[in-house]
Image (cartoon, rainbow, N blue to C red):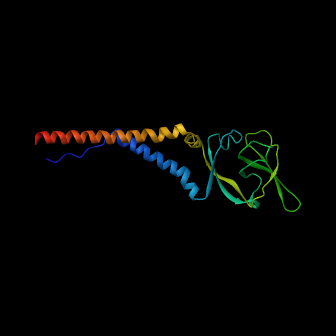
Amino acid sequence: MPAAAPTRSPLRRIAGGLLTAGALAVALVVLVPALLGYQRYVITSGSMTGTYDRGSIVYDRVVPTRSLDVGDVITYAPPAGAGPAGLVTHRIAAITPQPGGARVFRTKGDANPVKDPWTFTLTRPTQARVAFHLPYVGYALAALAERKVRMVLIGVPALLVALSVLAGLWREAGEAAAEARRA
């Protein structure tokens, strides 16, 4: 009499489906835009609240610096010592032409009452400009930056797979021993 094929429990099917959907979601959010030439940044402050809330991911497309206009939202590093350390995503509030063709930029966070206290020039021929965003998804990516979170997300499924394999081996060994006793 042939042995019946083992069936997976509904809980295992649901868990597998959720894990697959999660992996696909991460791929869509992280990998696909990168393959299409977008840079991604997680909004960590409230200076753009209302437009890009804290925890949102903004996707920037690199464009020629000359194509930037007042109203565009860019991601840039403020002048050293003048602003916060790291990158800032703010709206261009003013562009002042200078002799020789240089342009001086002034930005403002949409939620801030005043313009940023610094001005700057963009010396590179290209600049990252926001193309679109996904609200609150950045919290998940920020969590993945934590080692403990990654260990849980990788370790728990690996442990469950190992336990499932061991349970299957245990069951097969018991069936083989029972078969040997009958023979």
**5 on left or right of 43:** left
Q: What quarter of the picture does the C terminus occupy?
A: top left
Identified at 57% across, 55% down, the residue is 33
Q: How many marks?
A: 0
Q: Position of residue 123 (x, y in %)?
A: 78, 58
Q: Please identify the residue farthest to the right as the structure is shown.
A: 99
Identified at 56% across, 58% down, the residue is 35
Q: Position of residue 163 (x, y in %)?
A: 35, 38
**162 on left or right of 5:** right
**169 on left or right of 104:** left
Residue 17 in which image quadrant: top left
Name above or below for residue 8 compared with residue 123: above
Name above or below for residue 170 compared with residue 34: above
Q: Nearer the viewer, residue 108 or 161?
A: 161
Q: Position of residue 51 (x, y in %)?
A: 67, 44
Residue 182 in which image quadrant: top left
**76 on left or right of 137:** right
Identified at 26% across, 44% down, the residue is 6
Name above or below for residue 175 compared with residue 35: above
Q: Position of residue 176 (x, y in %)?
A: 19, 42
Q: Please identify the residue farthest to the left as the structure is shown.
A: 183
